[in-house]
Image (spheres, rainbow, N blue to C red):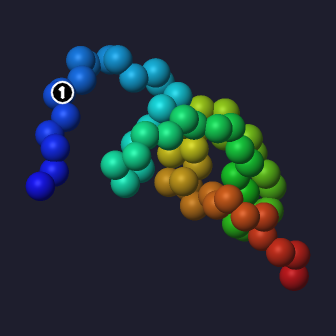
Amino acid sequence: MKKIKPAKKKGTMPKSVYKKGGATKAFKPHMMYNPKTGKGTMAKKMADHLRMKKLGFGHTKPKKK
């Protein structure tokens, strides 16, 4: 049986923390790459990461043809 954790107060988590699969992890700035041009852009904040993800950017640099 799972233990139920008490609810956290709203706004107690730092902005640089996100949840993934139940685990809480700190966001680390990283490069994201445009699949069409191969140009890399730094995702400094989680909001940057999510915006680029919607545009189709990925974590791996595309190979040149």
| In the image: residue 4, left or right of residue 52 | left
Pick the front one: 55 or 32: 32
**Position above or below: 39 against 17:** below
Residue reaching furthest to the front: 1
Q: Which residue is mark 1?
A: 7
Q: Quadrant of the N terminus?
A: bottom left
Can residue 26 be spotted in the picture? yes
Question: Residue 45, percent across and down?
Answer: 59, 32
| In the image: residue 55, left or right of residue 44 | left
| Residue under the image location 39 percent in, 23 percent down | 13
* Quadrant position of residue 24: top left
**Position above or below: 46 against 7:** below
Question: Residue 49, percent across and down?
Answer: 57, 44
Q: Amino acid at mark 1?
A: Ala
Pick the front one: 48 or 1: 1
Question: Residue 27, percent across and down?
Answer: 57, 37
Question: Residue 8, percent across and down?
Answer: 24, 23
| Residue under the image location 87 percent in, 75 percent down | 64
* Quadrant position of residue 65: bottom right
| Residue under the image location 16 percent in, 51 percent down | 2
Residue reaching furthest to the right: 64
Can residue 34 be spotted in the picture? no
| Residue under the image location 32 percent in, 17 percent down | 11
